[in-house]
Image (cartoon, rainbow, N blue to C red):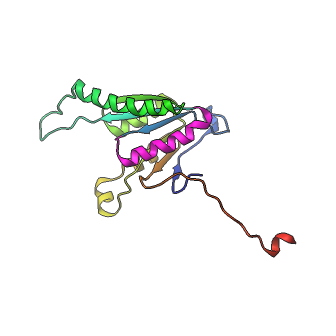
Amino acid sequence: MLLGLLVVGRFCASEGRSSMFSIRTVLVPMDFSACALAALDHAADLARPQRGTILLLHVVTPTASGLAEAEPIGPEVVSRFEDRLRQLADRLRAERLNAEPLVLIGNIEDEILTMASRRGVDLIVIGTHGHSGWGHLLLGSMAERIVRRAECPVLTVKDHVVARSLEVEVDAGEEASE
Protein backbone atom coordinates (compact mmCIF):
# COMPACT_ATOMS: atom_id res chain seq x y z
CA MET A 1 0.00 0.00 0.00
CA LEU A 2 1.32 3.45 -0.84
CA LEU A 3 0.87 6.03 1.88
CA GLY A 4 0.77 9.78 1.59
CA LEU A 5 0.32 9.84 -2.16
CA LEU A 6 -2.26 11.65 -4.23
CA VAL A 7 -3.53 10.24 -7.50
CA VAL A 8 -5.33 12.75 -9.65
CA GLY A 9 -6.39 12.42 -13.24
CA ARG A 10 -8.99 11.35 -15.70
CA PHE A 11 -9.66 7.88 -17.03
CA CYS A 12 -11.99 7.52 -19.97
CA ALA A 13 -13.03 4.12 -21.30
CA SER A 14 -14.80 5.78 -24.23
CA GLU A 15 -11.40 6.88 -25.60
CA GLY A 16 -10.43 3.31 -26.38
CA ARG A 17 -8.93 2.28 -23.08
CA SER A 18 -10.26 -0.79 -21.33
CA SER A 19 -12.34 -0.38 -18.22
CA MET A 20 -9.68 -2.24 -16.21
CA PHE A 21 -6.86 0.18 -15.40
CA SER A 22 -3.45 -1.38 -15.88
CA ILE A 23 -0.16 0.41 -15.62
CA ARG A 24 2.04 -0.56 -18.54
CA THR A 25 3.80 2.69 -19.39
CA VAL A 26 4.84 5.11 -16.66
CA LEU A 27 6.48 8.47 -17.32
CA VAL A 28 8.81 9.76 -14.61
CA PRO A 29 10.06 13.33 -15.13
CA MET A 30 13.57 13.31 -13.66
CA ASP A 31 15.47 16.30 -12.28
CA PHE A 32 17.59 14.03 -10.04
CA SER A 33 16.24 15.61 -6.83
CA ALA A 34 15.27 13.53 -3.81
CA CYS A 35 11.62 14.03 -4.81
CA ALA A 36 12.21 12.72 -8.33
CA LEU A 37 14.15 9.71 -7.04
CA ALA A 38 11.33 8.92 -4.60
CA ALA A 39 8.88 9.18 -7.50
CA LEU A 40 11.02 6.73 -9.48
CA ASP A 41 10.90 4.21 -6.62
CA HIS A 42 7.10 4.43 -6.54
CA ALA A 43 6.88 4.17 -10.34
CA ALA A 44 8.98 0.99 -10.23
CA ASP A 45 6.66 -0.52 -7.61
CA LEU A 46 3.62 0.31 -9.74
CA ALA A 47 5.08 -0.89 -13.05
CA ARG A 48 6.52 -4.15 -11.71
CA PRO A 49 3.29 -6.25 -11.57
CA GLN A 50 2.49 -5.60 -15.26
CA ARG A 51 6.16 -5.74 -16.33
CA GLY A 52 5.60 -2.22 -17.51
CA THR A 53 7.96 0.28 -19.05
CA ILE A 54 9.29 3.31 -17.23
CA LEU A 55 10.12 6.32 -19.37
CA LEU A 56 12.76 8.41 -17.59
CA LEU A 57 12.50 11.93 -18.98
CA HIS A 58 14.85 14.82 -18.33
CA VAL A 59 14.11 18.12 -20.03
CA VAL A 60 16.93 20.60 -20.55
CA THR A 61 15.56 24.14 -20.64
CA PRO A 62 17.40 26.77 -22.65
CA THR A 63 17.70 29.87 -20.48
CA ALA A 64 17.66 33.39 -21.81
CA SER A 65 20.07 35.83 -20.22
CA GLY A 66 18.83 39.40 -20.21
CA LEU A 67 17.55 40.51 -23.59
CA ALA A 68 19.80 38.16 -25.54
CA GLU A 69 18.54 35.00 -27.18
CA ALA A 70 18.78 31.73 -25.27
CA GLU A 71 22.18 30.14 -25.54
CA PRO A 72 22.25 26.88 -27.49
CA ILE A 73 22.52 23.69 -25.48
CA GLY A 74 25.78 21.92 -26.24
CA PRO A 75 25.97 18.17 -26.90
CA GLU A 76 28.10 17.72 -23.76
CA VAL A 77 25.19 18.91 -21.60
CA VAL A 78 22.75 16.49 -23.24
CA SER A 79 25.32 13.69 -23.02
CA ARG A 80 25.85 14.28 -19.29
CA PHE A 81 22.10 13.94 -18.60
CA GLU A 82 21.84 10.90 -20.89
CA ASP A 83 24.59 9.22 -18.85
CA ARG A 84 22.82 9.94 -15.57
CA LEU A 85 19.50 8.63 -16.91
CA ARG A 86 21.21 5.57 -18.36
CA GLN A 87 22.57 4.74 -14.89
CA LEU A 88 19.05 4.92 -13.44
CA ALA A 89 17.69 2.83 -16.32
CA ASP A 90 20.39 0.20 -15.76
CA ARG A 91 19.40 0.01 -12.09
CA LEU A 92 15.77 -0.58 -13.11
CA ARG A 93 16.76 -3.20 -15.67
CA ALA A 94 18.72 -5.02 -12.96
CA GLU A 95 15.36 -5.24 -11.15
CA ARG A 96 13.86 -6.77 -14.33
CA LEU A 97 11.97 -3.64 -15.31
CA ASN A 98 11.88 -2.06 -18.76
CA ALA A 99 13.34 1.44 -18.74
CA GLU A 100 13.93 4.00 -21.44
CA PRO A 101 16.03 7.11 -20.78
CA LEU A 102 15.00 10.24 -22.73
CA VAL A 103 16.55 13.70 -22.83
CA LEU A 104 14.68 16.52 -24.57
CA ILE A 105 15.33 20.22 -24.94
CA GLY A 106 12.44 22.63 -24.41
CA ASN A 107 9.81 23.78 -21.96
CA ILE A 108 9.64 21.24 -19.12
CA GLU A 109 5.88 21.22 -18.70
CA ASP A 110 5.14 21.08 -22.43
CA GLU A 111 7.68 18.32 -23.10
CA ILE A 112 6.33 16.16 -20.26
CA LEU A 113 2.75 16.48 -21.50
CA THR A 114 3.70 15.95 -25.15
CA MET A 115 5.71 12.83 -24.31
CA ALA A 116 2.86 11.44 -22.20
CA SER A 117 0.41 11.94 -25.05
CA ARG A 118 2.74 10.72 -27.80
CA ARG A 119 3.67 7.51 -25.97
CA GLY A 120 0.19 6.72 -24.61
CA VAL A 121 1.40 6.86 -21.02
CA ASP A 122 -0.90 5.24 -18.45
CA LEU A 123 0.47 7.20 -15.50
CA ILE A 124 2.82 10.10 -14.80
CA VAL A 125 4.67 9.83 -11.49
CA ILE A 126 6.23 13.16 -10.56
CA GLY A 127 8.11 14.36 -7.52
CA THR A 128 6.89 17.51 -5.82
CA HIS A 129 8.85 19.74 -3.51
CA GLY A 130 5.70 20.74 -1.66
CA HIS A 131 6.29 24.50 -1.58
CA SER A 132 3.48 26.44 0.03
CA GLY A 133 2.63 29.99 0.95
CA TRP A 134 4.38 32.81 -0.90
CA GLY A 135 6.84 30.50 -2.64
CA HIS A 136 4.01 28.52 -4.19
CA LEU A 137 2.06 31.67 -5.02
CA LEU A 138 5.01 33.29 -6.78
CA LEU A 139 6.57 30.27 -8.43
CA GLY A 140 3.58 28.01 -8.88
CA SER A 141 3.97 24.28 -8.90
CA MET A 142 5.17 22.36 -11.93
CA ALA A 143 3.55 19.21 -10.56
CA GLU A 144 0.26 21.02 -10.03
CA ARG A 145 0.25 22.31 -13.59
CA ILE A 146 1.01 18.81 -14.89
CA VAL A 147 -1.88 17.41 -12.83
CA ARG A 148 -4.26 20.00 -14.27
CA ARG A 149 -3.22 19.55 -17.90
CA ALA A 150 -2.38 15.85 -18.20
CA GLU A 151 -4.66 13.53 -20.14
CA CYS A 152 -3.72 10.58 -17.93
CA PRO A 153 -3.64 10.07 -14.16
CA VAL A 154 -0.81 11.74 -12.26
CA LEU A 155 0.76 10.54 -9.03
CA THR A 156 2.63 13.17 -7.02
CA VAL A 157 5.29 12.09 -4.54
CA LYS A 158 7.12 14.08 -1.86
CA ASP A 159 10.69 13.07 -1.07
CA HIS A 160 9.97 12.02 2.49
CA VAL A 161 7.07 9.70 1.61
CA VAL A 162 7.99 6.05 1.90
CA ALA A 163 6.08 3.17 0.33
CA ARG A 164 5.45 0.47 2.88
CA SER A 165 2.95 -2.18 3.85
CA LEU A 166 0.32 -1.28 6.37
CA GLU A 167 -0.85 -3.96 8.75
CA VAL A 168 -3.88 -3.18 10.86
CA GLU A 169 -5.12 -5.24 13.75
CA VAL A 170 -8.87 -4.98 14.16
CA ASP A 171 -10.79 -5.89 17.29
CA ALA A 172 -14.43 -6.17 16.28
CA GLY A 173 -15.51 -6.79 19.88
CA GLU A 174 -19.00 -7.95 20.78
CA GLU A 175 -20.57 -6.65 17.55
CA ALA A 176 -18.71 -9.26 15.51
CA SER A 177 -20.17 -12.17 17.44
CA GLU A 178 -23.78 -11.09 16.90
Residue 32: percent from left, percent from top: 35, 41
Please state if 163 lies on the left or on the right of 129 as rendered. right
Does the rendering let one see residue 8? yes
Image-quadrant location for residue 76: top left
Residue 97: percent from left, percent from top: 53, 31
* 17 relative to 159, above or below: above
Residue 41 falls within the magenta-colored stretch? yes
* 86 relative to 174, above or below: above
Q: Could you tell me which residue is drawn at 35 percent across and 35 percent down?
A: 58
Q: Could you tell me which residue is drawn at 63 percent across and 39 percent down?
A: 21
Residue 61: percent from left, percent from top: 27, 36
Q: Pick the residue in front: 173 or 124.
A: 173
Start and end of the magenta stretch?
31-51
Q: Residue furthest top?
A: 75
Does the rendering let one see residue 105? no
Q: Could you tell me which residue is drawn at 48 percent across and 43 percent down?
A: 41
* 168 relative to 89, above or below: below
Q: Could you tell me which residue is drawn at 53 percent across and 50 percent down?
A: 7
Q: Quadrant of the C terminus?
A: bottom right
Residue 115: percent from left, percent from top: 43, 31
Q: Pick the residue in front: 153 or 130.
A: 130
Q: Residue furthest bottom?
A: 174
Q: Residue furthest front?
A: 94
